[in-house]
Image: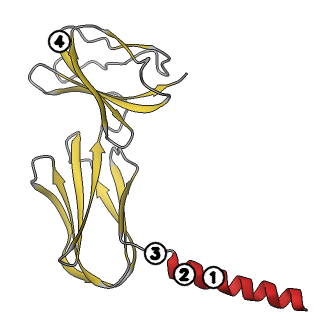
Amino acid sequence: MKLVKQLIIITLISMCYKSAFSQATDSLSLFPNPFGSSATIHFDIVQSDTITLRVFNKVGQTIRTYFQTTVLPSGSYNINLLGDSLADDIYFIKLDVGSKKSLMHKALKVGSTLGIINPKSNETITFYPNPVIDQLTIPINGNKTIILTDINGKILKTFTTDQQIISLLDISAGQYLITILSNQNEIITIQKILKIE
């Protein structure tokens, strides 16, 4: 009987602890990121407050406004971000909580498929081999700017080359996005690659 009482007390304490501390700070996240046709903006607010939730492009223009100085009770919220009408690019999600706190999250919009059709020739470009161990072939002739980002959109490497084979020996195993830009800084293709050891 004493053991049962101890278990009940431990269970009650852990339930109270979990509810009291499960939402200790305001938070903002996006999944999946990078996203294609849609993503979920998730945010938590610790206490009832006035919030504003907006999506900006990289030059600071507001693309979407979900809440504008709206009072919300404390809790967790999910908002669907539709990406079909958005160009493949980097976006920023900003959550203002009250007048003193702002949270920002970077979002990377890529095509719903791994490769984007080259707008100049209407052909699909495929990087190979994928998964890659050391060298990746990018079958695009001429000068191009290559931007390598991690799956969260952090730029790891940017360089311009006329070569079709690039070395990825200095990159650790994981999933990455490679964006290829033309000389006019237009996106030619964005592809997801898997680097293995």
Q: Amino acid at mark 1?
A: Met
Which residue lies under the disc numbered 4?
A: 143
Quote the CA–CA distance across marks 3 and 1: 13 Å
CA distance for labels 2 and 3? 8 Å
Q: Amino acid at mark 3?
A: Gln
Question: Would you call the spot at circle 4 few (<14 residues within 10 Å), some (14-19), or many (20 or more)?
Answer: some
Task: Select label 4 or label 1 by which is in front.
Answer: 1
Q: Amino acid at mark 4?
A: Asn
Quarter in which the C terminus is drawn: top right
Q: Secondary structure at mark 2?
A: helix
In the depicted structure, whether residue 153 falls above or below residue 128: below
Residue 43 seen in the current view: yes
Helix, strand or loop at mark 4: loop
Task: In the rendered view, tell whether residue 85 sits above or below residue 137.
Answer: below
Residue 102 in percent (x, y) is at 23, 67
Residue 178 location (% of width, % of height): 32, 27
- Residue name at image x 44 percent, y 17 percent: 169
Within-10-Å neighbours for mark 3: few <14, some 14–19, many 20+ = some
Label 4 close to label 2 by CB (< 8 Å): no
Could you tell me if the residues under marks 1 and 2 are in contact, i.e. CB atoms within 8 Å?
Answer: yes
Q: Which residue is mark 2?
A: 19
- Tell me which label, 4 or 2, sits earlier in the chain: 2
Name the N-terminal-most of marks 3 and 4: 3
Residue at horizontal 39 percent and vertical 39 percent from the top: 151
> How much space separates mark 4 and mark 2, taking CA atoms?
56 Å
The residue that appears at 35% across and 39% down in the rendered structure is 112
Which residue in the structure is indicated by mark 3? 23
Query: Label 4 vs label 1: CA separation?
Result: 60 Å
Label 3 close to label 1 by CB (< 8 Å) = no
Choose top left, top right, bottom left or bottom right for residue 180: top left
Q: Quadrant of the N terminus?
A: bottom right
* Residue 190 sits in quarter: top left
